[in-house]
Amino acid sequence: MDFFYPNLQNDMWRIFGHIFFNNKEHFLTENKKAFDKARLEEFLTQKGIALYDTATAVIRLQDNASDKFLEVVEPTDIELLLKQIPKCKAIITTGQKATDIICEYFSVKQPSIGNKTNISFHDRNLFLYRMPSSSRAYPLKLEKKSELYAQVFRELHI
């Protein structure tokens, strides 16, 4: 799937399904072998949730998904991105590398997992939420991850 979090071993879309539909399998295709991209895009658009990477070019230094083995070659132009989405109220990071990039860019202290910090961007105030990774390698049950994400969505009125 040419989209975010396509790996069935990643629980991001199960977390969203659990939170919004009380069904962790909500975004799976009928045969349960993939996530339904069209359904995801429709849902995210309806809720006003945008997804983007903090880097537009990376080199994977080892053959695994760990952030610590990513070398950022070209970071995303965060200022340009935020100028294009003036209604953005928050940035949510799900990995250490993304959190590092955002914190360095805005010169803010990293929030602990499940917490937030304020970001000042031109004439706007945003929140940076640091959420647990949706990877199954991160040692937290899906239900607990879902609780943390649900709290953010409640705070943002989503």
Image (tube, rainbow, N blue to C red):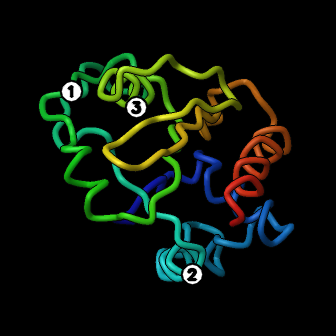
Ranked by sequence position, the earlier of labels 1 and 2 is 2
Residue depicted at x 29% and y 27%: 105
Count residues near mark 3 (Cα–Cα under 10 Å), then give few for <14, some for 14-19, many for 20+: some
Mark in front: 1 vs 2: 2
- Coordinates of residue 68 in the picture (x, y in percent): 38, 16
**Placement of the C terminus among the 4 image quadrants:** bottom right
Label 2 is placed on what type of residue?
A: Gln
Cα gap from disc 1 to disc 3, whole angstroms: 10 Å
Cα gap from disc 2 to disc 3, whole angstroms: 25 Å
Q: Which residue is mark 3?
A: 98
Label 3 is placed on what type of residue?
A: Ala
Ranked by sequence position, the earlier of labels 2 and 3 is 2
Label 1 is placed on what type of residue?
A: Val
Where disc 2 sits, the SS reads: helix
Left or right position of 146 against 111:
right
Q: Which residue is mark 1?
A: 72
11 or 108: which is nearer to us? 108
